[in-house]
Amino acid sequence: MLSSVIHRLSSVLLLLIALIAFLLVLEASYFVWALAGDEDLEKADLIVVFEGEYDRARVAYSLVDRSYAPNLLISPATEKKLRAYEKRYNPSRPYARIMEDKSRTTLENAVHTGEILRENGFKSAILVTSWDHMPRSYLLLRILTYSAHIQIQRSIVPTAGLDPTNWYGSPEGWKRTYNEMMELWGSLYELAAYRMRGAFSTDPPKQSAVSAFLRKMLLFDLDPVRS
């Protein structure tokens, strides 16, 4: 009887290992595709920037100046920050700016952006974010807009002086990609919790002892790079 139990446990363990391996290969394949470089952009209804490190806003305003979309959303950004961006980048073409100042995480960026796209009847958007952040951002936004049949295009912003088309030639490129692959699982967990609760957690993101411990154990400690 004991041997039978051990055999069953071994079978379950092997199945679990195979499932984890399959998911990791699937995730790695997706990251390779998502990090492959910019698409040939077409005009859209909205340019959306997931605010954070790097030179994302500058790229977004350059797309506005080239008439890629008549509307711009920076998530999150206060009225004060939007005025500062306009003063800094001095857009030459008229556009409508849409304010979203509530997001605290990448998932919240995607949720609030999806809501804005649906509420305004937009059918297409250009997502602007840094190259290592793009796979997670794009996947979350696609999941949250899939049922509305909204087209999402990618505009990748270089990170920390790395060439987005040759990121694998740098140790930092591998470290940043690994970090984002780990962060994706955290975002998917956050998405599942959001779906179950129907609301975001009121706790400050990434501040729990468990979250801090996992991040310290699983992620590389990389210096932030700001524009």
Image: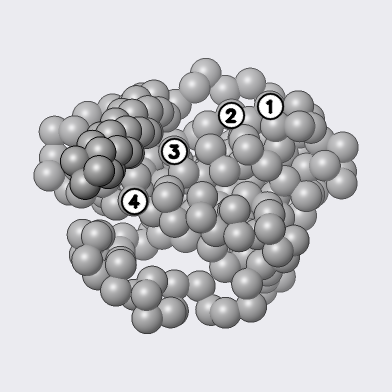
Label 2, secondary structure: give it: strand
According to the image, label 2 marks what residue?
153
- Nearer to the camera, 97 or 145: 145
Instruction: Decide: is 206 above or below 60.
Output: below
The image's colouring method is one colour
Distance CA(mark 1)–CA(mark 3):
16 Å
Instruction: Decide: is 194 above or below 43.
Output: below
Image quadrant where residue 54 sits: bottom left
Q: Residue at x 25, y 60 (%)?
A: 219
Q: Residue at x 19, y 41 (%)?
A: 3
Tell whether 65 sits left or right of 224: right
Distance CA(mark 2)–CA(mark 3):
12 Å
Distance CA(mark 2)–CA(mark 4):
23 Å
Residue 90, image x and y in percent? 61, 53
According to the image, label 4 marks what residue?
182
Q: How crowded is mark 4: few (under 14 residues within 10 Å), some or many (20 or more)?
A: some
Q: Nearer the observer, disc 4 or disc 3? A: 4
According to the image, label 1 marks what residue?
151
Residue 224 seen in this snapshot = yes
Question: Mark 1 vs mark 4: which is more N-terminal?
Answer: 1
Label 4, secondary structure: give it: helix
- Name the kind of residue labelled 3 in the image: Pro
Question: Mark 2 vs mark 3: which is more N-terminal?
Answer: 3
- Report if the CB atoms under discs 4 and 3 are less than 8 Å apart: no
Distance CA(mark 1)–CA(mark 4):
26 Å
- Report if the CB atoms under discs 2 and 3 are less than 8 Å apart: no
